[in-house]
């Protein structure tokens, strides 16, 4: 059972998340031949203050 975990800085819309889930599922089906029903995708929304880029939080960078 393929299981994909996606970490993203918070702020994506529900529609964008649905699109990510759909596309990652399709990619796993194509890449490994897994049945659609067996594919799992977990999106982790990470608060901007918990995401560091070059030693600075994404929040402080205005991202």
Image (spheres, rainbow, N blue to C red):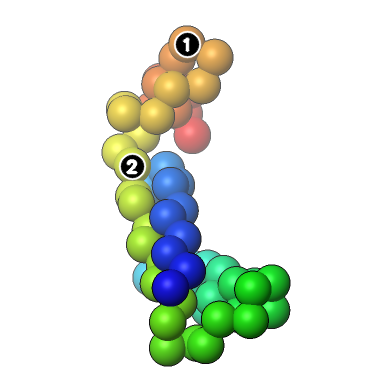
Please state the horizontal and vertical placement of residue 50, each as a whole percent of the image.
Answer: 31, 29
Q: Secondary structure at mark 2?
A: strand
Residue density around tag 1, few if under 14, some if 14–19, many if 20 or more, within 10 Å: few
x and y percentages locating residue 45 in the rendered image: 34, 50
Q: Place residue 37 in its image quadrant.
A: bottom left
Residue under the point 34% across and 51% down = 44
**In the image, is 54 to the left or to the right of 43?**
right
| Location of residue 50 with respect to 23 vertically, above or below | above
Q: Label 2: few (<14), some or many (≥20) within 10 Å?
A: few
Quarter-of-image position of residue 34 = bottom right
Answer whether residue 50 is visible to the viewer in this image. yes
Residue located 42% across and 55% down the image? 5
Cα gap from disc 2 to disc 1, whole angstroms: 16 Å
Outermost residue toward the top?
Answer: 55
Report the disc number at residue 46: 2
Instruction: Report the number of discs.
Output: 2
Badges 2 and 1: C-beta atoms under 8 Å apart? no
* Nearest to the observer: residue 16 or residue 36: 36
| Quadrant of the frame with the N terminus | bottom left
Q: Which mark is residue 19?
A: none
Which residue is found at the position 33% from the left and 42% from the top? 46
Question: Which residue is depicted at the point 64% across and 73% down?
Answer: 32
* Between discs 2 and 1, the one toward the N terminus: 2
Q: What residue does disc 1 label?
A: 55
Q: Nearer the viewer, residue 3 or 54?
A: 3
List x then y, in percent, for residue 16.
Answer: 49, 68
- Front residue of 14/24: it is 24
Q: Secondary structure at mark 1?
A: loop
Q: Is residue 13 visible?
A: no
Tell me residue 13's x, y (percent): 41, 65
């Amino acid at each position: 059972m393929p299981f994909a975990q996606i970490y993203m800085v918070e702020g994506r819309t529900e529609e964008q998340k649905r699109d990510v889930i759909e596309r990652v599922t399709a990619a796993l089906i194509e890449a490994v031949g897994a049945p659609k029903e067996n594919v799992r995708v977990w999106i982790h929304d990470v608060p901007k203050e918990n995401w560091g880029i070059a030693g600075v939080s994404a929040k402080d960078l205005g991202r």
